[in-house]
Amino acid sequence: MHEAYLSLLRTLSAYDLKNEEVARLLAATNNITARSRRPWRNRPCLRADCQKKMLQHFDDVSRTMPAGARKRYLAWVRNRPSRR
């Protein structure tokens, strides 16, 4: 489970780096150029991959818990605000 979580953190880091790259490019110019559009291409895929891995991680963690704790944990996860 620890290795899976590390993989998730790498995905989150890639998504955060892509957001930072987009922000830097947009801050550097007043015009949208081909160069400033490039980082946006993979962003939706990175976000979807990140969300998929997070859901899998939450499910994996919940499966290590007794039924009552699992139900409370998944309710807690469901009610947390999204990071993005």
Image (cartoon, rainbow, N blue to C red):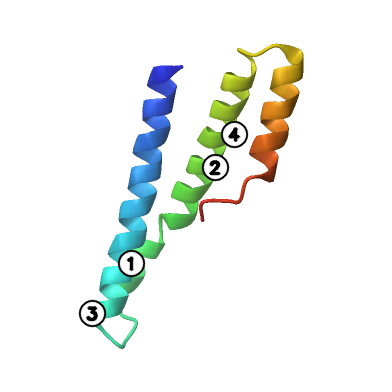
In front: 50, or 79? 79
Residue occupying image coordinates x 43% and y 26%: 5
Residue, disc 1: 22
- Residues under numbered marks 4 and 2 in contact, where contact means CB atoms less than 8 Å apart: yes
Alpha-carbon span between mark 3 and mark 2: 30 Å
Instruction: Give the residue type at disc 2.
Output: Gln
User: Which residue, as the protein is rendered here, is positioned at the far left?
Assistant: 28
- Residues under numbered marks 3 and 2 in contact, where contact means CB atoms less than 8 Å apart: no
Residue occupying image coordinates x 75% and y 14%: 67
Alpha-carbon span between mark 4 and mark 3: 35 Å
In front: 33, or 6? 6
Residue 68 can be seen in this image: yes
Residue occupying image coordinates x 70% and y 21%: 70
In x, y percent, where is residue 42?
Answer: 41, 55
Whichever of callouts 1 and 4 sits on the residue coming sooner in the sequence is: 1
Residue, disc 2: 51
- Residues under numbered marks 1 and 2 in contact, where contact means CB atoms less than 8 Å apart: no
Alpha-carbon span between mark 1 and mark 4: 26 Å
Residue, disc 3: 28
**Mark 2 closeness class: few <14, some 14–19, many ≥20 residues within 10 Å:** some
Whichever of callouts 3 and 2 sits on the residue coming sooner in the sequence is: 3
Q: Is residue 17 above or below residue 40?
A: above
- Residues under numbered marks 1 and 4 in contact, where contact means CB atoms less than 8 Å apart: no
